[in-house]
Amino acid sequence: GETLESFRKRIILSDGDEDVAGLATAGVPSANMLTAFRGAGKYDIAREYLEIEHGNATSRVFLYTPIAANEGGVVRETPATKQWPAVVFGHGLCAPAEFYEHLTTIVSSWGYVVLATDEYSSCDMSAFTRGESVNTTAYTEELERNVMYLLTRPEVNASAVAIAGHSMGGGASLNAAAALQEKAPGLVKAVVSIAPWNGVEPPPSTKVAQVQCPILLFCAVHDSLVPCSGPVTTEVRVGAIRIPFASLIPAMHGQHHGVDWGGGVLAIYENVSESSPAILAVVDEANHLNIVDTDGSRSQQAEAHFSRFLEFEETELEDGTVVPTIEYTVAFLEWALKGDLQAFDLLWGDGILSDGRFVQPVSRAATDS
């Protein structure tokens, strides 16, 4: 399969390979802010498709593993005994794992084993039976199984495991972290939740208080499907007809869901435990799909897929502006799983507050720990 340079050149963003590790980030009130965590890391990675048996359940996943350090064109294989921090990633509703390879490969290239589930990723309008579109509780359990599987792999550092996800996966990642906190306290060390859907069952806003680790939440100003707060404004396409998606929510997702997904992402943030450091970063120029992109080009596959039946608000990035989600995800993991002090300063100092790509001020809830 694809490994090393061919995979790196095909998937990983090339314009972030320059060394910016020493760049100061504080005091730069700019929409073109450059952080030390943008673009690919120094590791070449291997991609592997696995079918994992868990008793009566089978998990189909993609596993991304660092295999060699690539610095200035000099490639050095990593020792077979090396253990890496690990991340389980959950995709959105009807969104296969391949839609997220720009994100998952960049994260892995910074020195992480990344497991991206492909379960519950295939659906069309026929999947939306009245009252429930997908079994999100089962999907949460899938993420839990994936975490436990990673603990069995010799290349994984079991003391440095995080869960991340987008949309349905963003909500399920929080619910999975809450469930694992009860079953294996302290196992999950961080959660990154991108445009988390508060329509996952049970709503993540009702479970997030049980999560006892740092939490990074993203939402987008132009997200009409999973807004930061307020009503859903996405429209459904049926030929030339446009139907407000909000009017279909009771039939597609259950009568108990409101048109704002129970308060949306803001409700999740407001219910985080006081003992868990948390950040809610609102991305200025992004919608529900390109929030997991960088320059807008890597989300085109997802946009083509979903635009057949949904309309999303369009966004236009200024020349040179990069959507900040992935680089701040990397920074958050570098701090939470590796103790990186530069990442800490970016997240909890003036850096993130100076980044014009976010609506300011970014909401932060820190603890003394």
Image: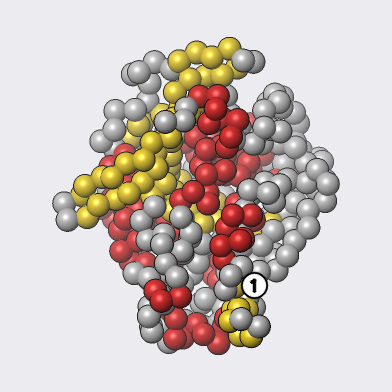
Percent position of residue 193, x then y: 51, 55
Q: Is disc 1 placed on a helix, strand or loop? A: strand
Above or below, 105 relative to 207: above
Residue drawn 20% across the image and 49% down it:
54
Residue drawn 45% across the image and 15% down it: 77
Give the total of numbered labels: 1
Q: Is residue 157 left or right of residue 275?
A: left
User: Would you place residue 238 above or below residue 169 in this image?
Assistant: below
Q: Residue furthest front?
A: 239
- Nearest the eye: 205 or 248: 248
What is the x, y in percent for residue 253?
43, 79
Asked if residue 287 can be seen in this view, the reply is yes
Q: 281 left or right of 262?
A: right
Percent position of residue 257, x then y? 47, 81
Decide which of 194, 115 is in the foreground and name it: 115
Task: Identify the residue under disc 1.
Answer: 311
Q: Is residue 134 left or right of residue 168?
A: left
Q: Is residue 316 above or below residue 335?
A: below
Residue depicted at x 54% and y 14%? 75
